[in-house]
Image: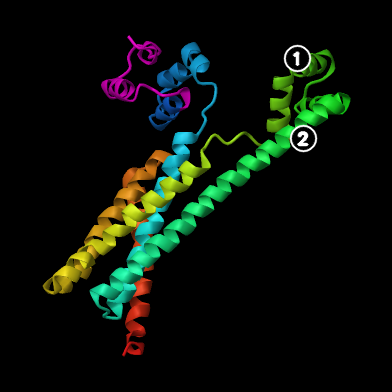
Amino acid sequence: MSRAKAALPEGTGREEKEFFVSAAVPNRFSLARFAYRRRDVAAAEAAHAHDHLERSLYETGRHSQHLADAVMGATDGIVTTFAVVAGAAGANLSSGVVLIMGFANLFADGLSMAVGNYLGARSQQDFWREEHAREIWEIEQIPHAEREEIRRHYRRKGFEGEVLEHIVRTITSDKERWLDEMMREELGIREEKTVPLASGLVTFGAFFAAGFLPLLSYAAAFFDASFLPRAFPISIALTAVALFGVGAARCFITRGRWWKSGLEILGLGGVAAACAFTVGHLLRGLIG
Protein backbone atom coordinates (compact mmCIF):
# COMPACT_ATOMS: atom_id res chain seq x y z
CA MET A 1 0.00 0.00 0.00
CA SER A 2 1.34 3.43 -0.93
CA ARG A 3 2.03 6.02 1.75
CA ALA A 4 -0.70 8.26 0.34
CA LYS A 5 -3.26 5.51 0.61
CA ALA A 6 -2.03 4.55 4.07
CA ALA A 7 -2.85 8.05 5.31
CA LEU A 8 -6.52 7.73 4.39
CA PRO A 9 -8.95 7.51 7.29
CA GLU A 10 -11.41 4.69 7.60
CA GLY A 11 -14.74 5.28 5.92
CA THR A 12 -13.33 7.19 2.97
CA GLY A 13 -15.81 6.96 0.12
CA ARG A 14 -15.28 5.32 -3.25
CA GLU A 15 -14.88 8.67 -5.05
CA GLU A 16 -12.20 9.82 -2.60
CA LYS A 17 -10.33 6.51 -2.85
CA GLU A 18 -10.35 6.64 -6.63
CA PHE A 19 -8.98 10.18 -6.47
CA PHE A 20 -6.15 9.21 -4.15
CA VAL A 21 -5.23 6.17 -6.22
CA SER A 22 -5.24 8.01 -9.54
CA ALA A 23 -3.62 11.23 -8.36
CA ALA A 24 -1.30 9.59 -5.79
CA VAL A 25 -1.84 12.71 -3.63
CA PRO A 26 1.22 14.70 -4.79
CA ASN A 27 1.29 16.77 -1.60
CA ARG A 28 -0.71 17.53 1.49
CA PHE A 29 -2.09 20.76 0.04
CA SER A 30 -3.76 18.89 -2.81
CA LEU A 31 -5.34 16.57 -0.26
CA ALA A 32 -6.36 19.50 1.94
CA ARG A 33 -7.99 21.31 -0.99
CA PHE A 34 -9.78 18.13 -1.99
CA ALA A 35 -11.11 17.77 1.56
CA TYR A 36 -12.19 21.41 1.75
CA ARG A 37 -14.14 21.27 -1.52
CA ARG A 38 -16.13 18.35 -0.10
CA ARG A 39 -16.16 19.67 3.49
CA ASP A 40 -14.69 16.29 4.50
CA VAL A 41 -13.22 16.59 8.00
CA ALA A 42 -11.74 13.07 7.92
CA ALA A 43 -9.85 13.77 4.69
CA ALA A 44 -8.68 17.11 6.11
CA GLU A 45 -7.26 15.30 9.13
CA ALA A 46 -5.50 12.90 6.76
CA ALA A 47 -3.88 15.90 5.03
CA HIS A 48 -2.37 16.84 8.39
CA ALA A 49 -1.12 13.34 9.17
CA HIS A 50 2.57 12.85 9.92
CA ASP A 51 3.39 11.27 6.55
CA HIS A 52 2.01 14.19 4.59
CA LEU A 53 3.60 16.80 6.82
CA GLU A 54 6.99 15.15 6.47
CA ARG A 55 6.74 14.62 2.73
CA SER A 56 5.45 18.05 1.78
CA LEU A 57 6.14 20.96 4.10
CA TYR A 58 5.38 23.42 1.31
CA GLU A 59 4.76 23.43 -2.41
CA THR A 60 7.29 24.74 -4.90
CA GLY A 61 4.49 26.00 -7.13
CA ARG A 62 6.36 25.10 -10.34
CA HIS A 63 3.68 22.91 -11.90
CA SER A 64 0.81 25.20 -10.93
CA GLN A 65 2.72 28.17 -12.34
CA HIS A 66 3.22 26.47 -15.70
CA LEU A 67 -0.45 25.56 -15.75
CA ALA A 68 -1.28 29.20 -15.10
CA ASP A 69 1.09 30.22 -17.93
CA ALA A 70 -0.60 27.77 -20.30
CA VAL A 71 -4.12 28.88 -19.41
CA MET A 72 -3.23 32.56 -19.70
CA GLY A 73 -1.40 32.05 -23.01
CA ALA A 74 -4.17 29.91 -24.50
CA THR A 75 -6.91 32.30 -23.44
CA ASP A 76 -5.15 35.34 -24.87
CA GLY A 77 -4.22 33.44 -28.03
CA ILE A 78 -7.79 32.42 -28.76
CA VAL A 79 -9.38 35.76 -27.89
CA THR A 80 -6.94 38.03 -29.74
CA THR A 81 -6.69 35.85 -32.84
CA PHE A 82 -10.44 35.38 -33.12
CA ALA A 83 -10.88 39.12 -32.63
CA VAL A 84 -8.67 39.59 -35.68
CA VAL A 85 -10.70 37.00 -37.59
CA ALA A 86 -14.01 38.58 -36.52
CA GLY A 87 -12.85 42.04 -37.51
CA ALA A 88 -11.70 40.77 -40.90
CA ALA A 89 -14.96 38.88 -41.39
CA GLY A 90 -16.93 42.00 -40.56
CA ALA A 91 -14.98 43.87 -43.24
CA ASN A 92 -15.45 41.02 -45.77
CA LEU A 93 -11.71 40.53 -46.26
CA SER A 94 -10.30 37.60 -48.20
CA SER A 95 -9.03 34.45 -46.55
CA GLY A 96 -5.46 35.37 -47.49
CA VAL A 97 -5.71 38.69 -45.66
CA VAL A 98 -7.26 36.97 -42.64
CA LEU A 99 -4.37 34.47 -42.52
CA ILE A 100 -1.75 37.21 -42.82
CA MET A 101 -3.31 39.24 -40.03
CA GLY A 102 -3.92 36.15 -37.91
CA PHE A 103 -0.40 34.76 -38.16
CA ALA A 104 1.07 38.20 -37.58
CA ASN A 105 -0.93 38.36 -34.37
CA LEU A 106 0.08 34.82 -33.38
CA PHE A 107 3.79 35.51 -33.63
CA ALA A 108 3.89 39.14 -32.50
CA ASP A 109 1.47 38.93 -29.57
CA GLY A 110 2.58 35.42 -28.62
CA LEU A 111 6.24 36.41 -28.47
CA SER A 112 5.34 39.57 -26.59
CA MET A 113 3.51 37.57 -23.92
CA ALA A 114 6.28 34.98 -23.73
CA VAL A 115 9.00 37.60 -23.35
CA GLY A 116 6.92 39.42 -20.74
CA ASN A 117 6.48 36.24 -18.72
CA TYR A 118 10.15 35.38 -19.03
CA LEU A 119 11.32 38.83 -17.94
CA GLY A 120 8.78 38.92 -15.10
CA ALA A 121 9.97 35.58 -13.72
CA ARG A 122 13.62 36.58 -14.13
CA SER A 123 13.01 39.89 -12.37
CA GLN A 124 11.38 38.15 -9.41
CA GLN A 125 14.27 35.72 -9.10
CA ASP A 126 16.87 38.49 -9.44
CA PHE A 127 15.12 40.50 -6.75
CA TRP A 128 15.03 37.48 -4.43
CA ARG A 129 18.74 36.78 -4.95
CA GLU A 130 19.66 40.40 -4.30
CA GLU A 131 17.63 40.57 -1.09
CA HIS A 132 18.92 37.15 -0.03
CA ALA A 133 22.54 38.32 -0.41
CA ARG A 134 21.76 41.52 1.51
CA GLU A 135 20.21 39.60 4.42
CA ILE A 136 23.25 37.29 4.57
CA TRP A 137 25.55 40.32 4.76
CA GLU A 138 23.45 41.97 7.47
CA ILE A 139 23.35 38.79 9.58
CA GLU A 140 27.13 38.52 9.35
CA GLN A 141 27.91 42.19 9.87
CA ILE A 142 25.18 43.43 12.24
CA PRO A 143 23.77 40.30 13.93
CA HIS A 144 22.59 42.29 16.97
CA ALA A 145 20.32 44.45 14.77
CA GLU A 146 18.97 41.45 12.88
CA ARG A 147 18.36 39.61 16.14
CA GLU A 148 16.40 42.60 17.41
CA GLU A 149 14.24 42.52 14.29
CA ILE A 150 13.32 38.93 15.07
CA ARG A 151 12.54 39.93 18.66
CA ARG A 152 10.30 42.85 17.59
CA HIS A 153 8.49 40.71 15.07
CA TYR A 154 7.54 38.02 17.60
CA ARG A 155 6.76 40.60 20.26
CA ARG A 156 4.14 42.00 17.89
CA LYS A 157 2.68 38.51 17.73
CA GLY A 158 2.16 38.58 21.49
CA PHE A 159 5.20 36.72 22.83
CA GLU A 160 6.93 38.12 25.91
CA GLY A 161 9.60 37.33 28.48
CA GLU A 162 11.48 34.04 28.46
CA VAL A 163 9.22 32.54 25.80
CA LEU A 164 10.13 35.37 23.44
CA GLU A 165 13.85 35.06 24.19
CA HIS A 166 13.70 31.29 23.64
CA ILE A 167 12.13 31.84 20.21
CA VAL A 168 14.81 34.39 19.30
CA ARG A 169 17.62 32.05 20.45
CA THR A 170 16.14 29.11 18.59
CA ILE A 171 15.77 31.00 15.32
CA THR A 172 19.13 32.77 15.42
CA SER A 173 21.07 29.67 16.49
CA ASP A 174 20.87 28.35 12.92
CA LYS A 175 21.97 30.68 10.13
CA GLU A 176 19.78 29.11 7.45
CA ARG A 177 16.73 29.21 9.70
CA TRP A 178 17.53 32.79 10.64
CA LEU A 179 17.95 33.81 7.01
CA ASP A 180 14.74 32.08 5.97
CA GLU A 181 12.86 33.85 8.77
CA MET A 182 14.15 37.24 7.67
CA MET A 183 13.25 36.65 4.03
CA ARG A 184 9.73 35.46 4.78
CA GLU A 185 8.73 37.52 7.80
CA GLU A 186 10.60 40.78 7.29
CA LEU A 187 10.47 41.02 3.51
CA GLY A 188 7.49 38.78 2.79
CA ILE A 189 9.14 37.08 -0.20
CA ARG A 190 10.08 33.53 -1.02
CA GLU A 191 12.23 32.00 -3.68
CA GLU A 192 10.51 31.50 -7.02
CA LYS A 193 10.92 27.90 -8.13
CA THR A 194 9.70 28.44 -11.67
CA VAL A 195 12.11 28.32 -14.62
CA PRO A 196 11.79 31.64 -16.50
CA LEU A 197 12.64 30.17 -19.91
CA ALA A 198 10.15 27.34 -19.44
CA SER A 199 7.50 29.83 -18.35
CA GLY A 200 8.03 31.85 -21.52
CA LEU A 201 8.02 28.78 -23.77
CA VAL A 202 4.86 27.38 -22.20
CA THR A 203 3.12 30.72 -22.66
CA PHE A 204 4.12 30.99 -26.32
CA GLY A 205 3.31 27.36 -27.08
CA ALA A 206 -0.15 27.62 -25.54
CA PHE A 207 -0.79 30.97 -27.23
CA PHE A 208 0.18 29.68 -30.67
CA ALA A 209 -1.58 26.30 -30.40
CA ALA A 210 -4.85 27.76 -29.13
CA GLY A 211 -4.67 30.87 -31.29
CA PHE A 212 -4.31 28.81 -34.46
CA LEU A 213 -7.74 27.22 -34.01
CA PRO A 214 -9.74 30.26 -35.24
CA LEU A 215 -7.55 30.27 -38.38
CA LEU A 216 -8.04 26.62 -39.31
CA SER A 217 -11.14 27.16 -41.43
CA TYR A 218 -9.56 30.12 -43.20
CA ALA A 219 -6.49 28.04 -43.99
CA ALA A 220 -8.83 25.53 -45.64
CA ALA A 221 -10.60 28.34 -47.50
CA PHE A 222 -7.26 29.64 -48.77
CA PHE A 223 -6.73 26.39 -50.66
CA ASP A 224 -10.40 25.89 -51.57
CA ALA A 225 -12.29 29.11 -52.28
CA SER A 226 -15.65 27.32 -52.12
CA PHE A 227 -15.04 26.80 -48.41
CA LEU A 228 -14.89 30.55 -47.67
CA PRO A 229 -18.64 31.09 -46.92
CA ARG A 230 -18.40 28.47 -44.16
CA ALA A 231 -15.07 29.63 -42.80
CA PHE A 232 -16.37 32.17 -40.30
CA PRO A 233 -19.18 30.00 -38.82
CA ILE A 234 -16.72 27.13 -38.39
CA SER A 235 -14.19 29.48 -36.83
CA ILE A 236 -16.88 30.63 -34.39
CA ALA A 237 -17.65 27.04 -33.41
CA LEU A 238 -14.00 26.05 -32.96
CA THR A 239 -13.30 29.18 -30.95
CA ALA A 240 -16.33 28.67 -28.70
CA VAL A 241 -15.31 25.09 -27.91
CA ALA A 242 -11.70 26.12 -27.29
CA LEU A 243 -12.67 29.06 -25.07
CA PHE A 244 -14.96 26.91 -22.98
CA GLY A 245 -12.28 24.22 -22.68
CA VAL A 246 -9.57 26.65 -21.61
CA GLY A 247 -11.97 28.30 -19.19
CA ALA A 248 -12.86 24.93 -17.70
CA ALA A 249 -9.15 24.18 -17.29
CA ARG A 250 -8.90 27.22 -15.01
CA CYS A 251 -10.63 25.16 -12.33
CA PHE A 252 -7.29 23.43 -11.71
CA ILE A 253 -5.96 26.83 -10.60
CA THR A 254 -8.99 28.52 -9.09
CA ARG A 255 -10.53 25.28 -7.72
CA GLY A 256 -13.91 26.61 -8.81
CA ARG A 257 -16.69 24.99 -10.83
CA TRP A 258 -15.40 24.00 -14.26
CA TRP A 259 -18.61 24.84 -16.12
CA LYS A 260 -18.87 28.28 -14.52
CA SER A 261 -15.27 29.08 -15.38
CA GLY A 262 -15.77 27.83 -18.93
CA LEU A 263 -18.88 29.96 -19.46
CA GLU A 264 -17.13 33.01 -18.02
CA ILE A 265 -14.24 32.83 -20.49
CA LEU A 266 -16.63 32.01 -23.33
CA GLY A 267 -18.72 35.07 -22.51
CA LEU A 268 -15.75 37.42 -22.25
CA GLY A 269 -14.25 36.10 -25.46
CA GLY A 270 -17.59 36.50 -27.19
CA VAL A 271 -17.82 40.14 -26.14
CA ALA A 272 -14.32 40.85 -27.49
CA ALA A 273 -15.13 39.12 -30.78
CA ALA A 274 -18.44 40.96 -31.13
CA CYS A 275 -16.68 44.30 -30.65
CA ALA A 276 -14.06 43.40 -33.27
CA PHE A 277 -16.70 42.23 -35.75
CA THR A 278 -18.71 45.43 -35.26
CA VAL A 279 -15.67 47.65 -35.82
CA GLY A 280 -14.70 45.69 -38.93
CA HIS A 281 -18.25 45.91 -40.27
CA LEU A 282 -18.50 49.66 -39.63
CA LEU A 283 -15.11 50.37 -41.26
CA ARG A 284 -15.40 48.00 -44.20
CA GLY A 285 -16.04 50.97 -46.47
CA LEU A 286 -12.43 52.04 -46.02
CA ILE A 287 -11.30 49.00 -47.97
CA GLY A 288 -11.52 49.73 -51.65
Q: Nearer the viewer, residue 159 or 143?
A: 143
Could you say which quadrant of the image residue 9 lies in? top left
Q: Counting residues from the N terminus, which is met first, the one under dot 1 or under dot 2?
A: 2
- Disc 1 residue type (three-letter): Thr
Could you say which quadrant of the image residue 21 lies in? top left
Q: Quadrant of the N terminus?
A: top left
Q: Residue at x 29, y 69 (%)?
A: 99
Q: Residues within 10 Å of mark 1 (few under 14, many from 20)?
A: few
- Disc 2 residue type (three-letter): Arg
Q: Residue at x 67, y 36 (%)?
A: 129
Could you say which quadrant of the image residue 168 lies in? top right
Q: Is residue 152 above or below residue 233?
A: above
**Residue 254 seen anywhere in this rendered image of the structure:** no
Q: Residue at x 41, y 18 (%)?
A: 42
Q: Please give the residue where the numbered disc 2 appears in the rendered image.
A: 134
Region of the chain picked out in magenta, as a range? 1-29
Q: Please give the residue where the numbered disc 1 appears in the rendered image.
A: 170
